[in-house]
Amino acid sequence: MSPVYPFDDAATARAVVDEHGVLVEWNEGARRLLGWAPEEVLGERAANLLADGPLGHLPDEPRWNGTLTVRHRDGRALPVWVLAHHRRPEDGGNWLLVTPLEGGGPPDPDDPLARAELIQSPCAVAIYDERLRLHGMNAAMADVVGIPADRLRGLRLSEIGGRRQSEDFEWHMHRVIATGQGNDVRTYVPIGGDGQVSAWLARMSPITDRQGRVRGVCVAAHDFTEQYRARERLQLVNEASVRIGTTLDVARTAQELADVCVPALADFVSVDLLDPPEHGGEPLTGPVTTPVVLRRAAHGSINAGSPEALSVIGRTELYPATSPQGASLVTGHSVVISKEAGDLDKWLSWDPARRLHFRELGVHTAMSVPIRARGVTLGVAVFSRFRQPGPFTPDDVLLAEEVTARAAVCIDNARRYSRERETALALQRSLLPRILPRTAAVQAASRYLPAARAGVGGDWFDVIPLSGTRVAMVVGDVLGHGVQASASMGRLRTAVGTLADIDLAPDELLTHLDDVVARMSAEAGAEGRPGEVGATCLYAVYDPVSRRCTLARAGHPPPVLIPPDGLPRRVELPSGPPLGLGGLPFESVELQLPEGSVLCFYTDGLVESRERDTDAGHRLLCEALAARGGSLEETCDRVLRTLLPAGGSSDDAALLLARTRALPPSQVATWDIPADPSLVAPVRKQVVDRLDDWGLSEAAFTTELVVSELVTNAIRYGTPPIHLRLIHDEAHLTCEVSDTTHTAPHLRRAKTWDEGGRGLLLVAQLTRRWGSRHTAEGKTIWAELDLLDDE
């Protein structure tokens, strides 16, 4: 509600006409002018008061002034000069019509208002009386308002301006009258009739008579529009530097460019980008050839939902050289088109639908700015105006180019990051196991999630089948992110696989792996990156025959054990130093696990986050694991939903779940072998009988040969006691011969006339795989037959 001042409402004839041409307001001054009382005209059409008949149409401009011939109540035609303001929709969208009723006579020489020197001042000055009605203005102020002073004399400022800001301005003028103290006010309104917003500093001072009484107010207006617009441009550039590039996401960065420029620079902004080259190639650095295919990356509008957009985000469109987009990309310079310059229709002739759409929206100017960074053409941004009245000025073009250049660097950074991230992800996928092997020892499931923002890292996991139906499970974490971390992870995973093949105990394996990381760090130091490689690791070996699990860790989080009938709990393990420090020991712990126990291995990215500490993460992990039900795959999904945010984690995370199995004694056969070659035949007979009991008669011939060779070699070259063990699972039959000699056998090629040397070669040819492992008592030679192939 407008403030109420002691104005003489009858000094101005004022009427308000709504958008339908109906009178909705009629003041006392209008009654004085035309004789009609408010109750006689309110609700009637304003055209009924025109003596010359209704106007053809209302003027399509924010302000109009001219002489209308209206009907007086007594029937005579009366010519009246009228100032009409078309208010904005937020101010009611109606028409305010005013005309002064006083102030037309010559001024009184003794009037203090008349003594104010106005005419020669280059500053725009207006004098208002104590009723805040215009007494006079100089030529500079008349130029600003756009109407001669003698036409406006007797009107209030709110009636001259016709805007809500004018009413606020009157409040400051009334304060000057009431207090007798000057006041400075800044305002940003379209004062003239062209609709252009200008910035003004109004300096108000009281006018007093000879007795010191306040008789009016002097308003001196100073135009600082250029300084204001320069400050706005600088503010937009600063805002762009803060708001654009907050993420390394191309689409988000493009949207930030559109959002920053609306409505500060344009009413609608679209951002279209070239598609990145396939297979990770370099983007275009040379000139662009037309027609060019662009993909809509983002758009923004002053209207909700961007109804001005002809293309949806993600869709491609072909632009010829005759389009502003194509022309700006080919030339590398901005293209500005406008209705004022007469080239808007010409530039839009390539797309009749677009031209019609521009006309319907009232777009009167557009600007196409190429998006380039580091010599690479990335796309184009188009700025359009339909609500802002003015065309793009040269300063606007420079501003758009500056903001677009900043956005281009951010978009290029995002694209480079995306390309490196895709490369690292491809490397990571190639290095991690795609399918976990099926073993008789455990049933396993896994997940790996790269970091949402930092990129892929060095987390890895693996399940490695060992001899004797045992299995090794490993999870590790290389410090850092990116391709280098993924490459280091690949080297460590390969090293673990190699060390696992020679059946090292967990603590010994970590000792050798520590040396590998130390060498990798030394290599990095030789390249100018000292101490770059660091890693943690957890290694476990599970034997389904004995149901024992041996674990050791190197600075890695301990696993969580879920017994078949108990609650999840962390396994207490000596922490061990992280890999790469060198010279510090690692310790192993052995657990006896019931069949059906679940071991949960993970990296710290799963339980650590900025929102919670590690202990809270462990509690959430145990809660997710305690919710029994479903497969291991479903448990993995439940764990990720519980611990990781929907938008992704700030660090990569790996998860490995393994449910233990057990081989019953009925599937294991053991013999003590006397050190007498003549007793090998009875042993072979016992083996064949056991295979018959297991229903594996088809494998008897091959197994008999393998057992004969391994037992004979142990008797000939080994040291008693000698043991033979057969292990049978669904897919494999394992033969193991152990003795107390630490010397490992070697496969060699026997010469034509040699009587021996072909035993291990025969074993290698007949079995799926074979090898040896050292034990605390000596060594074990083993060979594995694939029962599925035999069947």
Image (tube, rainbow, N blue to C red):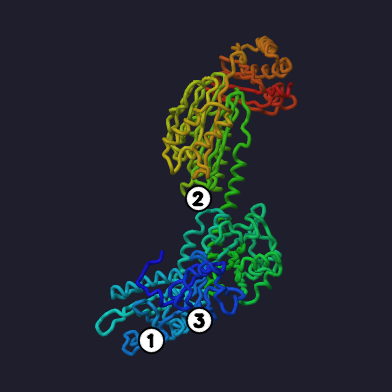
Question: Residue 402, can we see it?
Answer: no
Q: Relative to 608, is 666 on the left or the right?
A: right
**Residue 710: image x %, image y %?**
65, 19
Q: Which residue is mark 3?
A: 81
Q: CA distance from mark 2 to mark 3?
A: 90 Å
The span from disc 1 to disc 2 (Cα, nearest Å) is 82 Å
The x, y position of residue 379, in whole percent, is 62, 62
Q: Is residue 534 above or below residue 759?
A: below
Q: Quadrant of the N terminus?
A: bottom left
Which label belongs to residue 118? 1
Helix, strand or loop for disc 2: helix
- Seen from the viewer's position, the closer of residues 421 and 31 is 31
Locate residue 336, reporting x and y percent: 61, 72
* Residue corresponding to mark 2: 526
- N-terminal of the pair, mark 2 or mark 3, is 3
How many residues crowd around disc 2 within 10 Å: few (fewer than 14), some, or many (20 or more)? few
Total labels drawn: 3
Identify the residue at image location x=53%, y=77%: 64
- Which amino acid type corresponds to the residue marked 2 in the rendered image? Ala
